[in-house]
Amino acid sequence: GRVLISNPVLAGDTIYVRERLF
């Protein structure tokens, strides 16, 4: 996934990526 906070649909995926990378 990618950090796309603009899309609520990818919100969960965003958190996952942030926890993994950031």
Image: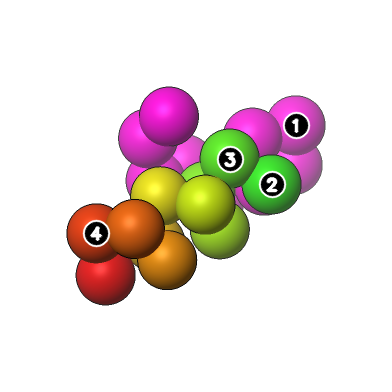
Q: Nearer the viewer, mark 3 or mark 1?
A: 3
Residue 9, position in %: x, y? 75, 31
The dot on residue 12 is 2
* Residue labelled with disc 4: 21
Hey, what amino acid is under mark 1? Val
Residue 8 among magenta residues: yes
Hey, what amino acid is under mark 4? Leu
Label 3: element kind = helix
* Residue labelled with disc 3: 13
Residue 22, position in %: x, y? 26, 70
Cα separation between marks 3 and 1: 8 Å
Hey, what amino acid is under mark 2? Gly
- Region in magenta: 1-11
Q: Residue at x 56, y 58 (%)?
A: 15
Is the C-beta separation of discs 2 and 1 under 8 Å?
Answer: no
* Residue labelled with disc 1: 9
Residue 3 among magenta residues: yes
Q: Residue at x 43, y 29 (%)?
A: 1
Q: Earlier in the sequence, mark 4 or mark 1?
A: 1
Cα separation between marks 3 and 4: 12 Å
Q: Is the residue 14 above or below the residue 10 in the image?
A: below
- The answer to whether residue 21 is left or right of residue 3 is left
Rate crowding at label 3 as few (under 14), some (14 to 19) or many (20 or more) other CA atoms within 10 Å: some
Label 1: element kind = helix
Q: Which one is nearer the viewer's eye here, 8 or 19?
A: 19
Cα separation between marks 4 and 1: 20 Å
Cα separation between marks 2 and 3: 4 Å
